[in-house]
Amino acid sequence: MPESPAARLADLVQDWHPPVVTSSRRVDPWPAAAFADLIDADPPALDDGDPLPPMWHWFYLLPHPRTAEIGEDGHPADGPLLPPIPGRRRMFAGGRLQWHAPIPVGSELHSRSEVTSITPKSGRSGEMLFVTVRTELGVGPGAGGDVAAVEEQDIVYRSEPEGAERRTIPRPDADQPAPGGAWQLRRPTDSVLLSRFSALTYNGHRIHHDHPYTTTVEGYPDLVIHGPLLALLALELPRRYAPGDTVSRFEYRLTRPAFLPSTIVASGDREHGSGDGDGGTDRATLAVAAEHVLPSLTATAEFR
């Protein structure tokens, strides 16, 4: 019986034992202010001690590999948390984040990241490797500080070695009605916005800025809007519509890419409890989509 594609991927990573990776950096105001300007938003308070908005820690603790270490796709060719598979293609699939305390501006932010799950799978789109990276975020002086948040990110990898048949991803149908939801945000996107977000997050992935590479090598119909940008736009909804409340947990799933040219629409509704005796969970259901297209991201945000 021939070996399954998932089994072949499993063979490639069976001896991969990624290390724990740590990093530290002061939470300066500039990256947060720059992102607010990027999305034409009123900036949050950014004096020392003010809390970062949810997920804005993504603009800190960024790896900065040397140019000589960058692979064909714009990501590092190798790295401690990157699986050793040929022709590696990366897709951000979603994640979860639980906050225990704020991350204040002016604080020392520490991260401790490790791979907690490696799962080969086969599906209609071919063989894939699902990798979950867990990161503890600590705040304060000393080694690691006090844990403020725990994050998990799900990354999907494909192997497309040289000479492999190139896949083609069609542009999705734009036949969906306008989304419902009391919370609404519209964000026109273009190649300039994607380039600025790539720069702010030190993300060299060429599918966000190199049109010929994106269409001829990776098979997308146009430049791909960053998955993390979609997640951040989802969290703009509670930041703008429930500014006095604190998000304690955020869970999101990326279901399909969003492409240029498009206006991104974030929508959501808040659900105050479920009548379970203690009032239930106070949460919001959120979605982000290119206009008239099925959602690229679905999410829930819980409040405390």
Image: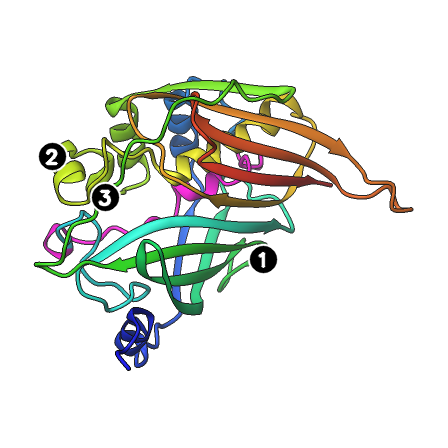
Can the viewer see residue 134?
Answer: yes
Question: Magenta segment range?
Answer: 48-69
Residue 67's place in the image compared with 48, above or below, is below
Residue 212 shows which numbered tag? 2
Q: Are marks 1 and 2 in contact (CB under 8 Å)?
A: no
Instruction: Determine whether, in the image, residue 1 is placed left or right of residue 301.
Output: left
- Give residue 184's position: percent from left, percent from top: 56, 19
Q: Nearer the viewer, residue 4 or 54?
A: 4
In this rendering, the label closer to the viewer, 2 or 3: 2
Q: Residue at x 45, y 57 (%)?
A: 111
Label 1, label 2: how far apart the Cα atoms are: 43 Å
Secondary structure beneath label 3: loop
Q: Where is mark 1, residue-wise? A: 147
Cα gap from disc 1 to disc 3, whole angstroms? 30 Å
Q: Which residue is mark 3?
A: 205
The image quadrant where one finds the N terminus is: bottom left
* Disc 2: CA contacts within 10 A as few (<14), some (14-19) or many (>=20): some
Q: Earlier in the sequence, mark 1 or mark 3?
A: 1
